[in-house]
Amino acid sequence: MNELFNNIFFIPLIVALIIQLAFILVLYGHLAFRRKNNFMPADHEFVPVSVVIVARNEADNLYEHLPKILKQDYPEFEVIVVDDQSNDETLDVLKAFKKHYSNLQIVYIGQEVNERTGKKLAITLGIKKARHPLILLTDADCYPLSDKWIRYMARNYSPARPIVIGFSPYEKKKGFLNYFIQYDTFNTALNYLSFAFAGMPYMGVGRNLMYSRSLFFQHAFSGQLHIPYGDDDLFVNKIALSSNTTAEIHPDSFMVSKPHHKFIKWYRQKRRHLKTGNEYKFSHRFWLGFSWFSYPLFVLLFTGAILQNPYSYIIWGILAARYFAMWLIYSISAIKLNSARLIWTFPIMEAIYNLLYLPVMGLISRFSAKNRW
């Protein structure tokens, strides 16, 4: 034991372990140990909902997925699709659906409109068109896992908590790119859902996000119009509080999205999303950064400690304790988020993600040019 205390890395390693376990067991435990809630209010208790979808050149996706949204089992709702400067058959598809679905509304933005605000103008026009007090956002390439999607999202709404953060996984396909996208989506959700359940909501995804119409017009995108992205997470980051936000993780509330098949398209999307993180509140950037930094710090300290005492059962036990806690919490969370295929690769994927992917993409996103959507 004396030789351990002579190891300059041992005490810092113990501190790093405590920090890591705090994030894993306490913070991420909010998601892992969240009890499943099957309660469903009566029909008359539900608030009418306006689903808003922004589409640009999405004729094929709308043809395939829009009926699943228009046929939702919900007392009173409408679907507003904003055709944002499409040059394909998007508008024709929408007009054809309009003949058969009275709850479909169309907003058209012509190609002559010169706007540099990403989706913000389209979302604003869609919400202005909305007749109902509750807004539910999704994308044209998304489809619900259940006809109860709106119900499960709307059951969380109350005047005191008008923001509901949902989860949107990607379709499972073959290949490493899809597997990495699955892990990235899970890791992102693990963070924003755990933080939300812990009382520190900092983002939501526009593929599955609900808030009140009045709340939107109280804040809109003021102070963010110069940023051509962040219509979902920056908006939530600005207005979400522990007192006005909740999250929904029932599988019937999930909206599945089609993943990119080409690395360059996924890379551009992720670069834009990571760049958005630079605009978060300082407190959110601090805790997210601290959460990430504590992992490579632990790895570095363990490496130094084990090089000095390679046969120490205590040092190896510290590593085992950390990874057992991680694997347990991540696995329980993955099962909740329909991501069980990731369970057996968590240790290696965590290392690749935190030691290689995030540092490289973080630097690229910080110094890259702004993108339109």
Image: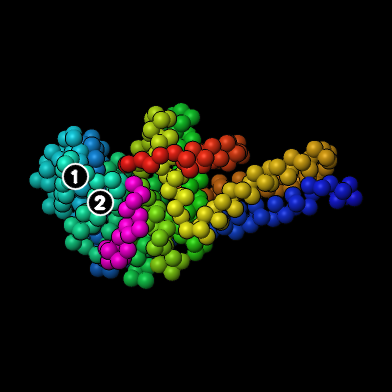
Of the residues shown, which amino acid type is indicated by label 2?
Leu
Spot occupied by residue 346 in the image (x, y as percentages of width and height): 58, 40
Foreground of the two, 310 or 368: 368
Few, some or many residues within 10 Å of mark 1 (<14, 14–19, 20+): few
Question: Which corner quadrant holds the C terminus?
Answer: top left
Residue 182 in sight from this viewpoint: no
Foreground of the two, 238 or 352: 238
The residue at the point 38 percent across, 30 percent down is 261
Instruction: Determine the image quadrant of residue 224.
Output: bottom left
Distance between the Cα atoms at labels 1 and 2? 10 Å
Spot occupied by residue 305 in the image (x, y as percentages of width and height): 78, 43
Spot occupied by residue 94 in the image (x, y as percentages of width and height): 15, 43
Q: Residue furthest bottom?
A: 160
The colour scheme of the drawn protein is: rainbow
Instruction: Determine the image quadrant of residue 348.
Output: top right
Establish if 245 lies above or below 313: below
- Nearest to the eye among marks 1 and 2: give it: 1
Q: Please give the range of residues in magenta.
A: 213-228
Determine whether label 1 and label 2 are within 8 Å by CB. yes
Residue 220 lies within the magenta run: yes
Q: Which residue is mark 2?
A: 121
Q: Which residue is mark 1?
A: 113
